[in-house]
Image: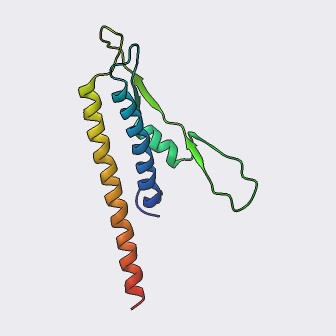
Amino acid sequence: MDAFGGVDTIRLLTGGLKTAEINHRLIANNIANVDTPNFSPTTLDFEKTLRDNLEGRGGFALRTTRPRHLDFRAERPQFERLAFLSKNDYNKVDMDEQLAKLGENASRYTTYARLLRKKFETQKSMLSALGR
């Protein structure tokens, strides 16, 4: 356990990666539907989804019939809001806003991935030092 409120940092970082991946899919869907009439974009509440993921809430578990089955949880993202402004075709996607969110989400994902890699490199060097 590390200093992140009793949460294992590997679990925190992998949860962040999963949440960023869900967010990326939602943003990409919003961008793909920029010209779809009557489309309302969805926005992920990143912090709440990550917190629910770490606390084991917000998903559902599949039933396992054998002890060797893998544990799988399908995540249910927490949505922040729906857009209210619309164009003439009642499409509410603001392309500039979505591209800014995509950039922010990509930087989050990269940060989590780098921190996770650094964590594993540290553990690997500690194990290598013990073997000497």
Confirm whether residue 5 shows in the render.
no
Q: Is residue 80 above or below residue 91?
A: below
- In the picture as drawn, the residue positioned furthest to the top comes out as 88
- In the picture as drawn, the residue positioned furthest to the bottom comes out as 132
Q: Position of residue 73 (x, y in %)?
A: 59, 47
Relative placement, left or right, of 53 versus 45 is right
Relative placement, left or right, of 60 versus 65 is left
Q: Nearer the viewer, residue 4 or 124?
A: 124
Q: How many marks?
A: 0
Please identify the quarter of the rendering in which residue 87 is found.
top left
Relative placement, left or right, of 111 versus 128 is left
Q: Position of residue 57 (x, y in %)?
A: 57, 42
Q: Position of residue 33 (x, y in %)?
A: 37, 24
Residue at (56, 39) in percent of width and height: 58
Residue at (36, 34) in percent of width and height: 28
Q: Is residue 4 above or below residue 41?
A: below
Q: Is residue 67 above or below residue 85?
A: below
Residue at (29, 35) in percent of width and height: 101
Give the position of the C terminus as an image quadrant: bottom left
Q: How is the image coloured?
A: rainbow
Confirm whether residue 20 shows in the render.
yes
Residue at (34, 49) in percent of width and height: 109
Q: Nearer the viewer, residue 129 or 97?
A: 97
Q: Position of residue 45 (x, y in %)?
A: 41, 34
Q: Nearer the viewer, residue 83 or 53?
A: 83
